Amino acid sequence: MTRSKRPPKRRASSSPKFLPIPRGFHTVTPHLAVAGGAAAIEFYKRAFGARELSRESAPDGRVIQARIKIGDSVLMLSDVFAGSDRTPPSSVGTSTVTLHIYTKDVDEMWNRAVDAGAKITMALDDQYWGARYGHLVDPFGHSWSLSTPIRMGAAVKRAKRAEAMAAFARGEHPSKTPEFTDI
């Protein structure tokens, strides 16, 4: 068995200016592949109040790399270019990842996102785990969930949990049952 040769281990700089994680970023940063990067940035601004931090564009206007900030979180995004191993969810018809946003006023953000063109896949509702929560898909195929914690009495939590577990027991997702759908 042949072992692959590892590159030499690099030491982090001891310089006080060196940051292994750039300012404003967290350890994990989503990097979205989109078809229509410039339009996606505008959608995220309208829907989620994103701020554009930076953008590098190709001569044809496609986004090579952009950074946007939603709340305190940075996301990167880019258009897909020939030869890339990345594929936008719109090309395969689904997304395997959901980006989750906690927000103070979930109803307001929800309405902005829907007005901007997001499609509801699970209605915004008070959930048994104590959150007002729902799912959306943006026009570029990315899945988003929005929520805020809420106060909920124990009896209401038990009733909502029982409804959800009954749906799961029937092999259904609770978001697809009438008692959870108010679209």
Image: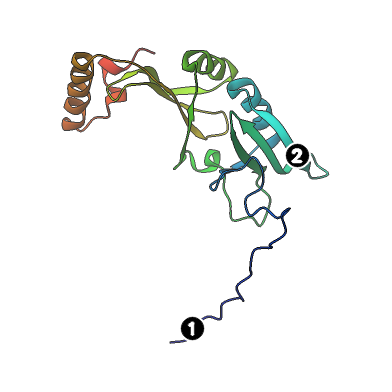
Say whether residue 90 is left or right of residue 98: right
Front residue of 14 and 178: 14
Query: Which quadrant holds residue 66?
Result: top right
Q: Residue at x 74, y 38 (%)?
A: 54
Query: Which quadrant holds residue 174?
Result: top left
Q: Looking at the image, which residue sits at the far bottom?
A: 1
- Image coordinates of residue 76 in percent, x first then y, are 63, 42
Q: Is residue 136 visible?
A: yes
Q: Is residue 36 visible?
A: no
Q: Is residue 131 above or below residue 100?
A: above
Residue at mark 2 to residue at mark 1: CA–CA distance = 40 Å
Say whether residue 39 is left or right of residue 111: right
Query: Which quadrant holds residue 176?
Result: top left
- Image coordinates of residue 58 in percent, x first then y, are 79, 45
Quarter of the picture containing the N terminus is bottom left
Q: Which residue is mark 2?
A: 55
Mark 2 and mark 1 lie on one chain; the one further toward the N terminus is 1
Helix, strand or loop at mark 2: strand
Q: Which residue is mark 1?
A: 3
- Image coordinates of residue 80 in percent, x first then y, are 65, 47
Quarter of the picture containing the C terminus is top left
Q: Residue at x 53, y 47 (%)?
A: 28
